[in-house]
Image: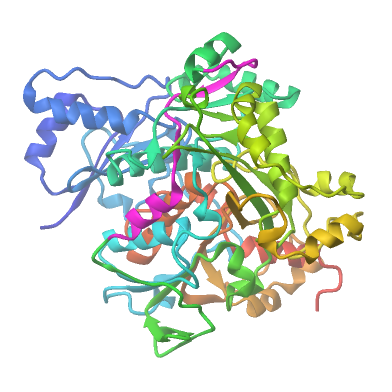
Amino acid sequence: MTHHTHAWANIPTLAQIQSHLAAHPDSRHLIFCLPANHVIPQWQPENEQQQPLAQAWQEATRCLAHDAVNYIRQWQPETDLWLLPPYAARHLHEHFPQPENIIWHTPPVAQQPAPPRQAWQQPPTRQSETNTTAQPHVLIIGAGIAGAATAHECATRGARVTVLEAHAPAQAASGNRQGLLYAKISPHPTAQTELLLAGYGYTRRLLQRLLPMQQSWGASGVLHLNHNPSETQRNAQLAQNQHYQHLYRPVSPAQASQIAGIPIAQSGLYWQHGAWLNPPALIHALLRHPNITLHPHTKAQSIHHSGNQWHVHTPNGIFSGSHIVFCTGADNAHTPIIQHYPFQIIRGQTSIAPATKGSLKLKTALSAASYISPAWQGEHCYGATFAPNNPSRDWHAEDEARNRQALAQLSPYLAQQFADYYAAHPIRQPENECSEFRQNVNEPSHDYLGSLKTQRQPENEYNKFPRNQTPCKPNQAQAQLLRQPENERNEFPQKGHTATRCDCHDHLPAVGAISNPTALRTTYAAYALDKNYRIATPCPYLPNAYTNTAHGSRGLATAPLCAAEIAAQICHTPRPLSERLRQALNPNRLIIRQIIRSKNHP
């Protein structure tokens, strides 16, 4: 059966959609163009046959983004739904490879041409790819949220997938006990806001589809509190967007207290469809597919391409495939090829406390300068610390203390509920003569896997201290603590999770086809003299090589949608990211930026 793409310049009625699906079972993609007035119909079914369709529409529009592409996979068993804002409707070529073949059921939306791009921004051509007609066999390096989601998206498009993980799945930044899913967006139409809005809805629908019983996640919403003047101003500006009241709404302290079930002293924004979740549960669900073969404890030692195949050498043998995707996060620095791209690392630590009768009253996740989730399996997860350029993955007593202090600021009520636990499990924290320095590099982060602080971070590479800062020597108490075995540094066993996250200088992930790093620097070396220099030389892409990495602490909201983009590029299916986002996330930008900022580049 030939599959077709059908489009409407508006949103058809429920009866029209029902009639179309009955008459056109070959509809692989349905495109509805969203109205400029942001009014979305919420239909009442006229008969029992329309009931499932009306419910599916309600699910599809629950987290609708008016300013981003809404890609709803498997809206019907064999049909994907695309809800496009006006700009995207005028640029269908950004998503569909042959827009002229789209079947319109209304007068078509006039299309606008693509703007010119620099040579390094041009995507790889089909002619430069190998094995374009054979079924792809995709090698994915890494089994965190990005790797698992990329494996899932490729597998559901028919590709054979081999996942190579140096450790076990969901161990590093994706191994946190509870993370938050919502979109900490700017009130301005930035690329990051577009990505977060589109990704938030995509992951929210993914959770409902893969884990419908909600045994490892909770759709109880997220309260983001006004904890300082800048957040108060940002939330006030967001609250003025009346067309996003279905996503979030402003709440007073009294309203926040009623929603949370505990006393709340601040006002804020309530993301009513936000969720907490156990990231490992989602990762394991993503990897459960017959087309996916997982190889844990299989570290990539060397990687090369020959004979139209990628070959990954590991202690467990050589694995070969037609395509390769690097999803190694903080391990990028130790992974062949991708290690030559510039990334930053951020250490984070969360804490765990047993639930009490009082803490069980918490009904929704709280977020401010730190976060806490409702109890799951008898425990609360809260934190997290934020230490740029710190590679340590050890549990630190001082970070446990910071998380406790941050919780007391977030919710004095909950901190009081844990007072007995804290008293029974004190922290022997050494005096820190460099407290001012550590405060600068180890502030509590906004949350652990849902949203990263947008403060500008140092641009130097791994394991270096920020500019104008020098590492301080430990005092006697610190030195004694560091000489102790890790499990003897405190009076109670480690409770919580520590990992390093990977980020880019602009806090956007790196997603897309990757180049030969050395050849890229050589080809565009003239940018060191003039960033506006016109260079027509084609970008030296590696054949069939991609990355989906550096999601920072936003991986739950961004990695699955970016995985869908990578899978679409590999399998030549419609692509969910706009051209604006593809350029903003282009991995080449990282090296091009290095060249431009270099004064002595050869």
Viewed as shown, does residue 331 lie left or right of 409?
left
The residue located at (87%, 55%) in the rendering is 477
Residue 116 seen by the camera: no
Residue 172 vertical position relative to residue 165 in the rendered view, above or below: above
Colouring scheme, one of rainbow, by chain, secondary structure, one colour: rainbow
Rendered image quadrant of residue 503 = bottom right
Q: Quadrant of the N terminus?
A: bottom left
List x then y, in percent, for residue 333: 64, 71
Whether residue 411 is in magenta: the answer is no
Residue 343 vertical position relative to residue 164 in the rendered view, above or below: above
The residue located at (44%, 24%) in the rendering is 272
Residue 549 vertical position relative to residue 189 in the rendered view, above or below: below
Residue 559 vertical position relative to residue 129 in the rendered view, above or below: above
Query: In the image, which residues are magenta?
Result: 262-288
Rendered image quadrant of residue 563 = bottom left
Q: How many marks?
A: 0
List x then y, in percent, for residue 112: 45, 43
List x then y, in percent, for residue 247: 45, 25
Viewer-closest of 600 and 90: 600
Rendered image quadrant of residue 38 = top left
Viewed as shown, does residue 474 lie left or right of 503?
right
Viewer-closest of 80 and 418: 418
The residue located at (29%, 31%) in the rendering is 59
List x then y, in percent, for residue 137: 33, 75
Whether residue 266 is in magenta: the answer is yes
Residue 23 seen by the camera: yes
Q: Farthest residue toward the top?
A: 254
The residue located at (21%, 35%) in the rendering is 105
Q: Quadrant of the C terminus?
A: bottom right
